[in-house]
Amino acid sequence: MSALGNSLPAQPDAGSARGRRRVFWTDARFLLGLVLIVASIAGVWAVVTMSRQTSPVYAAAHTIVPGQVVTSSDLTVVEVALGSAHDTYLAPGAALSEVVATRTVQAGELVPASATVTAAQSSVTSVVVHSSVDVPSAVRTGSVIELWAADQTERGVYAVPRVLIPRATVVSVQRDDSMIGGGTAAIELAIPREDVASALEAISAQAALSIVPAGAAG
C-alpha cells in the first residue's frame, strides 16, 4: 500500500489553479484599463488640438442689408476655430462676383454662405422713398420697418394711412433737419420685388409716406 500510494501522480493544488486564473483575468482587466486610459487621453488631445486650429472666414466690415451687392470692401478676414462648421461660412477664395445678401448681417458677424445668392436669384431690390415726416432716431441701416402711405385725395388732403409694405429693411437714411416744421428724410429701402410696383405707384401719386419701426404701430 505504501509503494502504491507513492506511485500515484501528485494532484494539482486547486488553490494554485484558481490563483493562476485570477492573475490571468487581472492582467487582462489591467491591460484593458490601460487601453481605455490611452484612448481617453488621445481623444482629449485631439479635441484640444482641433479647437486650437483656426481658419480664415469673412466677417461683415459693416452692416450688410438684404439686396445689397456684397464686395470685398464689405468684408474683413478673421481667423476663427470653426471645426467642421467652416464650410457654412463665406471664406477667402469664394467667388464674390454679383453676390447679393439675402438677410441683414451685422457688423462683425461672420457671413454665412446661406446669407448670399447671385443677383439673378435675389428676391429683393432697393428703392428710395422720401418720408413726409422725420423718421424715428432708432431707424438706421439694418432696421426692419413698415412703410405706411396716405393717398392724396386732392391737393393737400390725404386719406387714412395704410400699411403699404409690411416689412422692409433700411439700407441708408439721409435726414434733413433744415426744413421748417420738422425734418424730412430720404430712405433707401430693401423691399421684396413683388412690392416694387406698389411703392413706385405711391411715389408717383405723391402719397404721404412714413417710416414706422416694425411692430411699433400695433
Image (cartoon, rainbow, N blue to C red):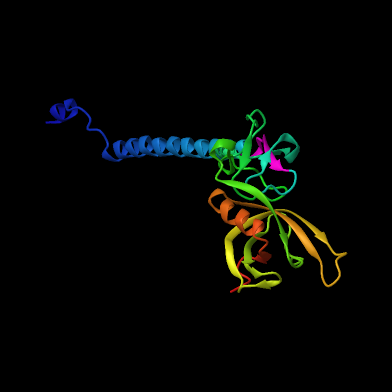
How many discs mark residues in the rendered view? 0
Left or right: residue 62 versus residue 192 is right
The reply to whether residue 192 is visible in this rendering is yes
Q: Which residues are magenta?
A: 51-60
Residue 24: x %, y % from top left: 36, 34
Task: Indicate whether residue 32 is drawn in magenta.
Answer: no
Q: Residue furthest right?
A: 178
Q: Quadrant of the C terminus?
A: bottom right
- Residue 171, above or below 84: below
Which residue is depicted at the point 34% across and 35% down? Answer: 20
Residue 108: x %, y % from top left: 72, 47
Foreground pick, 66 / 202? 202
Which residue is depicted at the point 64% across and 62% down? Answer: 145
Left or right: residue 64 versus residue 182 is left
Foreground pick, 28 / 207? 207
Residue 86: x %, y % from top left: 59, 37
Foreground pick, 100 / 57? 100
Indicate the quadrant where residue 98 lies: top right
Left or right: residue 2 versus residue 206 is left
Q: Quadrant of the N terminus?
A: top left
Indicate the quadrant where residue 175 lies: bottom right
Which residue is depicted at the point 61% across and 71% down? Answer: 161
Q: Residue furthest left?
A: 1
Residue 110: x %, y % from top left: 66, 44
The reply to whether residue 66 is visible in this rendering is no
The secondary structure that most of the magenta stretch takes on is strand
Left or right: residue 37 versus residue 134 is left
